[in-house]
Image (cartoon, coloured by chain):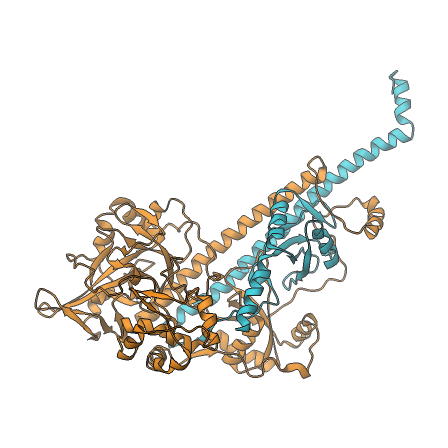
Amino acid sequence: MGHAKADNESETVELEWGKAGGRGKNPSVKFYKSFKYDGTDYAVHDCVYLYKEGVDEPYVGKIVKIWGNEKLKVNKVKVQWFFHPKEIQYYLMGENVKEDELFLGSGKGLGVANVNPLEAIAGKCNVVCISKDSRNPQPSAEELSKADYVFYRTFDVDSFSISDKWGDHVGELEAKFVFNRINEISENLSLPHVVDDRNVGGCKVNRNNSRMGSSEDPESKAKDKFASPIDGARKTEDPVKEFEDVDNRPAKRTKLELQDNESKEINGISLERNTKICSSKDSLVLAKDLQLDSKSNHNDVALSKKRKVDEDFEVGKTKFTMKFGDDSRSYVPSKSSSILKSSAIEKSKKLVVTRRPNVDKNTWFKDGPWEDRMLTAQEHGTLILLQNLDPEYTSGEVEDIIWHAFEEKCSAKMVQHTAISSPFSGKAFVIIRSKEVVDRVLKRLLEDCLMLPNGRPLVGSRARLPKVSEKLANFDGHLSIDKLKHKVQRDMKEAVSTSHYSQPNTIEYEMAVDWFLLQARSTMWWKKLHKKQADEIKKHKANLKSKQNAN
Amino acid sequence: MGSADEYAAFEEKVKRTMYVDNLSPSVTPPVLRSAFDQFGNVKNVQFIPNYFEPKEMPQAALVEMETKKQAEIIIEGLSGTPFMVSGMPRPLRARAAEVSMFADRPIKPGRRIELRWVDRNDPGFAEAEKMKSLTKLHSAEASFLLKRLREDEANLAKKQKETLTAHYQKYEMIENILSDGTVNRLANKYGMKF
């Protein structure tokens, strides 16, 4: 398990130091708070991939410390590890593990953190903390959908135990550096994870909270302490236990109100972070005296409610509140900086989907029932089926997506999910105005990939609806005795309701139990299938991420 | 602001709604409503259209109850005891509804959709292409499984039909020999009292 791919690249790749963070005892050692490597900015507390050839899932860690030794010309990062469930399978004891869940290493001892060559970093990784801990700003649905991984539990390398309780320190990190920073979104996919210090007492950032360990490489990470089981687990490629559906994690948690008022809120919130990280002077001053006047601005009310942010943020011993409204202009610096940053990172091909113009104004033209329109569209070849959508999208949002991606109006209908629908691929029927446009859309979707926020490409195909059979065949599982059919039908007409609970001493009960069995069995089938598919999707997603990040 | 309230209200509705399937195509909204009105107050019934299978396949529906509690109790009840609507013996199956099952779901506040075109020059292109074919594979797998499920259902129904017919014939035979005097004649012949 040597180092990640890095070494051979190090000669060609550019490294640029960011803010200095002081000197070590050794005069040639210099600490840094951030650096730019291969075009990507990294800062302390960012989560990164440490990629190693031949391992199907790259290691993920959080940067604790960065330094370079000028004399020896070596650059190091100290990384606190996240564990993949696979790696600690032995200790999970059948715990339910979310599909993209990681476990943050905690406790003291080998395996929590290692010093690695800086060049071992393969890219940023977006790890979102979904702990319900009051100190943790809950991620929005969007943040979740962009997350490469989520975590809410720790793995203690001393006691080999899993815990979802967060103390003041986790391994080498103070707890506040573990939780999400507010507003990670605006900074693009992979964001550093630093601070939210609401409710965290004594908010001084302790940069020296990590002791510099002796040089260890990633290899020793698991090996030393976790000699047999874990290391074994790392090698074997057993599928991880009990995944839950992931892609459409319905994100019932609180969400940031982003839509319209987004920028404002982001400003307000990002502020705190900026004071910590960018330490922009403006915001620093502001942070001392933020006032959240929830009445001054509706949006903010929504925000504060949604996020369950009480009106008081306790930071240290001072009561900080935020004020939007008039003061919001003071946030402009932080706003523009974060937006600039994100747009710089964003590839030019990125489209942000907003509501189409005149979306609710088609009152002058009433359409017939959807089913009829769909059939007509099928005849004309203007009906397509989209897949891979977030199952929670609304039909309107699908129309917006088509509008932004192809500049075509259409009518869309999300296929309503049932018990057997794929939990990660939402489908939608779309009727487009002409066959030519359909051809263009499908061609483009086939040749290029339109990546959705869930990290997967939109798949389009011509839709084929099932043939409508005229006669209503018998429903499998509802039995009747032919000779009595007539009578039964007459009875049914007279009956007000023909529903009942079956009594255990009847033949129908016995037969119903057979159906129960079949239903239960099929539930298992679907569960298994969806789990397998989720695994595959996840693998591809990770590959995609690491490829794009590596580049 | 309005949208947040709207969404919160919608989420409440989701909580008190049951998803019911294994319904015969002959079940209509009023039938379903009266079936569940026995246990509580049905506020709304909505069938989920099935665009991928022929009409004679089982239907699914959303049944909104007055309270979350009512829905939970019914779901619990239906999982233990077979509950049949408009026919026997195939029982209904009920579960808690999910957001993605509703046709009229509002847009989730705060959701931002960002699209990105990945073309041939993008490092992730090959992987994204793979994901596209994976999606198709997955949907083929799902159709296959569904086909298998429908076959199993048909087989079970056929088997039960045979059992039922056999039982019926047996009873019919007994009834016939009782009513046409055969039993009495046989009893006389063998000197037995009947």
Q: Report the residue that reaches farthest toward the front.
A: A318
Q: Report the residue that reaches farthest toward the top.
A: B191
Q: Residue at the spot x=45%, y=79% of the render? A: A351
Residue B36 visible in the displayed image: yes
Q: Output the letter for the chain in orange.
A: A
Q: Residue at the spot x=28%, y=77% of the render? A: A285
Quadrant (top left/top right/bottom left/bottom right) for the N terminus of chain A: bottom left
Residue A197 visible in the displayed image: no
Residue A541, by quadrant, is bottom left
Viewer-side residue, A387 vs A279: A279
Instruction: Indicate left or right for A486 with A479 as reference.
Output: right
Query: What x and y, as percent, mark residue A73?
Result: 12, 69
Residue A336, by quadrant, is bottom left
Query: What x and y, as percent, mark residue A397?
Result: 54, 73
Q: Output the letter for the chain in cyan.
A: B
Instruction: Indicate left or right for B104 with A189 as reference.
Output: right
User: Relative to B34, does residue A415 appear above or below in the rendering?
Assistant: below
Q: Residue at the spot x=50%, y=75% of the render? A: A445
Q: Residue at the spot x=42%, y=56% of the render? A: A99
Query: What x and y, as percent, mark residue A182?
Result: 36, 68
Instruction: Indicate left or right for A235 with A130 as reference.
Output: left
